[in-house]
Image: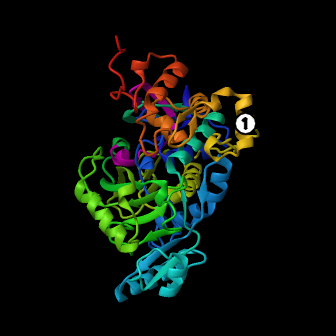
Amino acid sequence: MIFDVAVIGAGVTGALTARELSRFDLKICLLEREADVAMGTTKANSAIVHAGYDAKYGTLKGKLNVRGNVLMDQVTRELGVPFKRIGSLVLAFSDQDLLTLRKLYENGVKNGVPGLKLLDRHQVMQMEPNVSKKVKGALHAPTAGIVCPYELAAGAVENAVKNGTELKLECQVQDIKKIEGGFVLATSQGDIKARFVVNAAGLYADLLSAMVNGPEFQIRPRKGEYLLLDKSQGNVVNSVIFMPPTEKGKGILVTPTVDGNLLAGPTAVDVSDREDLSVTSSGMNQIIKRAKQMVPDIQFRDVVTSFAGLRATPDTGDFVIEASRKAKGFINAAGIESPGLTAAPAIAEYVLDLLRQQGLELKPKTDFNPVRKPLLRFSEMSDKEREELIRSNPMYGNIVCRCETVTEGEIVESIRRPAGARNLDAVKRRTRAGMGRCQGGFCTPRLVAILARELGIPAEEVTKKGKGSKILMGEKV
């Protein structure tokens, strides 16, 4: 088979691009080197939908941030993904900070960000009474919001698969050759032929691009560490709280999550290892110090977990979204660091336009269905709704994860869906089983048993996140 388009990388950019392509009468494959979607930057970032005042005017970041922010309402509604427009505040603690806020405001206006306001100290304290009383003012962006990035990616892939896209997991691209009429991708699952290729490979996008184009840009991994706090801290602030940005990014922030927790971070440290997800005591201390400067009353004794993510920082200073000048039909969607999550729906549109310019015929499907029914959330139901659900399927009466009130029914559904969960972390990202205070201490054995049963494999073959991460060494004798 020759695919019309091969999309490499199932992070949020590749996922939404594949979903956008699935609107058309095309043969599409989505290739992912890991055992699940959203395993790279998408699984570990700030989960912020940025308003767009920070990205430099005239850049792709600036243009696609604002457009992606607008599209996020429709995309999340169609995919059944939680999204909340809670607004953001950039706090000022000095006269220099106030000047920075003025520049951000002016840049945001040029970028077309609606509703921006410069607030005085009194207005800030009225909106967010728990921020530091040393605050002098803030920039308020009401269109900023929060979303679950890995749920957005998983939802997009599921919808793309329902609309005919072929998903190939644990399929690492090892080489790309240009041939007449398209490309041959040498992968860990054999050769794949495609007329067009979209390179959305995140931290590895420069290496894949070099296979076709030679070295054109470079990706530098930038590590960001985070602290996730218990839901007891989820209402300490109501908005996304920033300090003024630096040359390395938007800095450490404090924000509620869509699931009711509180998130603080990230740090920003350039690293050489594209797999370095280590967490450091110095990083944690930096987060705590900076977060308490903004919101002094955060109780960091209620930290549930710490984690790190890697951003794909390009040496160009902007997103690298362009058609190859050397190989017709090859599109880079690379260097998608912040505000990449926000921009992702707009990046998908932009990539489709580039493909069209390269000669891809986009004939709309008559039967495309943009709607993905969300997973049931037992924890969010009324008692009456729970009783009716349990009557229809008794598995919803079996609580597996007590911390997050996740039932066997939800876990089974996450496995059985198109592009469904195949390991513990995949179940966790789709259902939140194992994300509570005990971090899977009680529910992991039951999750392993359910996965083994549903996948038809021995329990010792169940993994945490794919190859090389088995949970059990063997059955107890």
Report which residue position mark 1 lands on. Answer: 387
Residue 187 is covered by the magenta coloring: yes
- Relative side of 290 to 7, left or right: left
Please give the count of numbered marks on the rendered protein. 1
Q: Which residues are magenta?
A: 184-207
Q: Position of residue 26 (x, y in %)?
A: 63, 37
State left or right for residue 469 relative to residue 36: left
SS of the residue under disc 1:
helix
| Residue depicted at 64% across the width and 31% down the height | 397
In the rendered image, which quarter is residue 157 located in?
top right
User: In the figure, 344 relative to 295: above or below?
Assistant: above
Please give the name of the residue rendered at 39% of the width and 73% of the height, measured from the top-left corner: 294
Of 404 and 6, the residue lying toward us: 404
Asked if residue 17 can be seen in this view, the reply is yes
Residue 195 lies within the magenta run: yes
Tell me which amino acid carries mark 1. Glu
Q: Is residue 57 visible?
A: no
* Coordinates of residue 459 in the picture (x, y in percent): 43, 19
